[in-house]
Image (cartoon, grey):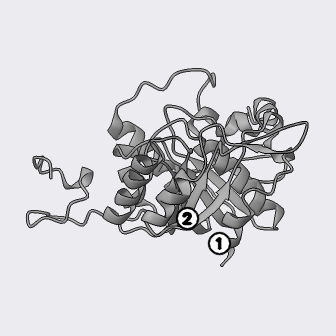
Amino acid sequence: MSECTHDCSTCGEACSERTESPFQIKPLHEGARVGKVYGVVSGKGGVGKSMVTSQLAVTMRRRGFNVAILDADITGPSIPKTFGVHARAEGAQDAILPVSTRTGIQLMSVNLLLEHETDPVIWRGPVIGGVVQQFWTDVLWEDVDYMFVDMPPGTGDVALNVFQTLPVDGLIIVASPQELVSMVVEKAVKMAQMMNIPIVGLVENMSYVTCPDCGRKIYLFGEGKTEEAAARYGLPLLARMPIDPALAKLTDEGAIENFEGTWLDGVADALAK
């Protein structure tokens, strides 16, 4: 345990000196409705959380659900570009209106509020945490069945803020099959345990490449590491996503809603249960 700062709002410990609960779930806007909330997390960056979040939202939308994405990666937002959304969010009386994609997925991201989407966000942690809270409390989310929160990498202020102020129903951990996978998964698992949030399961991204000539799967980073990590922590490995040039092209073009893979069906099945 680190040295106490006596600021209970930024601490997840349940110590004897605590004067307030670490969990202070914030209410939605009075006109909004959100059903289940799932965070997409990892213990490090660069593993494809935004890619998984986007494809999972598309998968659930295709199953007939009303879906939303809250982009909590304030300093590295990528969700709007993935969907080809460049319009700015608008306000209505005392609320912010989410921007809808071509198929009706509701989005809220800091990029939808900036004058130029390439402007850097140079804010301190408390300000960033406050913006994430406002994405929950001030946005008029319309009849959402599933909301996915695209988390920033690691286990810092924003993650703590989300878990203490949003009613997160579960976490989906994203990892890649390098040697670091065990450490990455362990960080995410311990964070979930400390915040008392259930883990839905594990998704391995960049799992393999399919040979265009013979169809054989080539495991560039080796095979089985993520499965071993999942077994070690008693987690289901729900999906293995390939490195797919066609998928990367769709992402660059802002056309993620056109992807044809079924890699995340196992995650969707687990959520539907």
Residue at image position (67%, 42%) is 219
Q: Position of residue 148 (x, y in %)?
A: 60, 56
Closer to the N terminus: mark 2 or mark 1? Answer: 2
Above or below: residue 80 compared with residue 265? above
Label 1 Cα crowd, 10 Å radius (few <14 / some 14-19 / many 20+): few
Q: From this view, report whether residue 219 is shown above or below residue 149.
A: above
From where the camera sits, is residue 10 visible?
yes
Q: Which residue is tagged 2?
A: 201
In contact (CB < 8 Å): disc 2 and disc 1: yes
Q: Which quadrant of the view contains residue 33?
A: bottom right
Q: Which residue is mark 1?
A: 270
Neighbourhood count class around disc 2 (C-alpha, 10 Å): few under 14, some 14–19, many 20 upward? many
Residue at 43% from the left image edge and 65% from the top image edge: 233
Outermost residue, bottom direction? 273
Task: Give the structural element (helix, strand or loop) at label 2.
Answer: strand
Can residue 98 be seen by looking at this rendering? no
Instruction: Give the structural element (helix, strand or loop) at label 1.
Output: helix
The one of 12 and 246 positioned closer to us in this rendering: 246
